Image (cartoon, grey):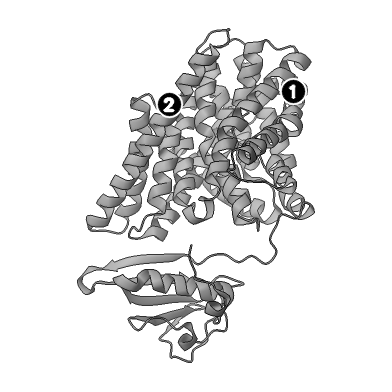
Amino acid sequence: MELDVWLLLGAGVVIAAIAAVRMAHRSGFPSLLIFLGLGLLLGEGGFGIQFENAELAQQIGLSALALILAEGGLTTKWSHVRRAVPSALVLATVGVAVSILAVGVAVHLVLGFSWHTAMLLGAILASTDAAAVFSVLRRLPLPPKLAGILEAESGFNDAPTVIAVVLLSTSGTQLPHLGNALVEIGYELVIGAIVGLVVGPLGSYALRRVALPASGLYPLAVLALTFVAYSGAALLHGSGFLAVYVCALILGNATLPHRSTTRGFAEGAAWLAQIGLFVMLGLLASPSELPSAILPGLIAGAVLVFIARPLSIVVSAAVARFTRIDHLHWREQAFLAWAGLRGAVPIILATIPWAADVPGAKLLFNEVFVIVVVFTLVQGPTLPFVARMLKVSVAGQTQDLDVESAPLDELNAELLQMRVPQGSRLHGVEIFELRLPADAQVTLIVREGRTFVPSNSTRIRADDQLLVVTTASIRKTVENRLRAVSRQGKLAGWFGEGGAE
């Protein structure tokens, strides 16, 4: 009976959270705050559910974060972030260090925190949140370079911040030796990167050559491989978060069967992880203790948003320009500074010193909770306005086509499934005007729930689903041609559009 009650409660929370996501999506309100609100409502200040196990919350939170990072890697297109990776790595290392120092120094001078506590708070707040960035920024029409930097940064910067928080949480009340800390961070990042670079290609190689009996097994296998990378790196005392993101990035961009199914499954699993994670963190918070944390939280958050984050962007941009990695315009730097969203990650990181019994850790948790709620509410809904004001948004940008491949081994052929997005130049193009290679054919169109076989004169419409049969040898050519027409219309070749990802 008790199990049934908990299952009913859990299912009710998930359904309520899904409905909240729908409302939040239409209004622009950050959904993570609704999930936190559900947790607070269920907790000691509402229905009275008691949950104060910081160590358990830490373990669940880190596991959920690994799953969210895996989904981020699986759904990130390498072609979109390839040019942005060097700049993102600078932000995830130099930027994180500058942010920790800026917050630490300001909090020590203004709030009177000890150097150890101030630097610990700076480390907790240094990471942008992958879930918040992926959910908000992927709805904004940003240039590929800017969107790529933000996505890659949010995937990379969790690793160094987790290492920094753990080092500060296990060093007692004294700051760790700088040289030793840099060596430790460097070692863990290198091991994590190596594990991700090994597991990703090996997993991709195996999945391309092992015919699984059911399509639903491929998403399970891919997610399992990402956690092999995560746990393998952790057992080698490396960064599991860097390993899982690198591995997922490789697997998500490999030519694997049922890629769209895998991405859809990963997105669903990540949403479930986000819902459970934020509700749990809401349960962990004590509403009666939050008022005393409001003033120091607002001060520390203001330092983070208006001083530390902009300073980290400026310094990182200077380093990138000096090393000829990239050049960021001041408008891009300003948007990057405002788009450094914080979400569940800082709250999860705040449970690490709490579980380690660091003096004052519960107060830090409450302050971080206040910072995340207040400044997510301020920054998240204003991002579209800031993008337009800084003129970094790209009006009229259409989505790329999402192409899924199902192998037809006996015929040495492949079936491509494609949905025509709104705004695509494919709208109005006749089938013969696609000029696909001779060994490729549009065999079926699904339109408004009706399926029919098209003729050469059939005009494609937005929201159509097309099934294209092609030989494996020309699959890439077919995909490129479809993308080219989607972007530039039937005369794409005249405009030099090749359809590359």
**How many neighbours does mark 2 have within 10 angstroms: few (below 14), some (14-19), or many (20 or more)?**
many
> Is 183 in front, or is 352?
183
Q: Residue at x 45, y 70 (%)?
A: 480
Q: Residue at x 62, y 56 (%)?
A: 139
Q: Which residue is mark 2?
A: 188
Res 21 seen here? no
Kind of residue sitting beneath label 2: Glu
Query: Total marks drawn?
Result: 2
Please provide percent x and percent y for residue 145: 60, 52
Q: Is residue 190 left or right of residue 216?
A: right
Q: Between disc 2 and disc 1, whose residue precedes?
A: 2
Q: Which residue is mark 1?
A: 291
> Is 276 in front, or is 288?
276
Please provide percent x and percent y for residue 346: 59, 30
Q: Residue at x 32, y 40 (%)?
A: 198
Res 74 seen here? yes
Q: Nearer the viewer, mark 2 or mark 1?
A: 2
Task: Look at the numbered disc 2 and give the secondary structure of its residue.
Answer: helix
Q: Are marks 2 and 1 in contact (CB under 8 Å)?
A: no
Please provide percent x and percent y for residue 43: 59, 29
Furthest toward the top, the residue is 173
Please provide percent x and percent y for residue 162: 51, 26
Q: Is residue 354 left or right of residue 103?
A: left
The image quadrant where one finds the N terminus is top left
Q: Which quadrant of the view contains residue 410?
A: bottom left
Kind of residue sitting beneath label 1: Pro
Furthest toward the left, the residue is 410
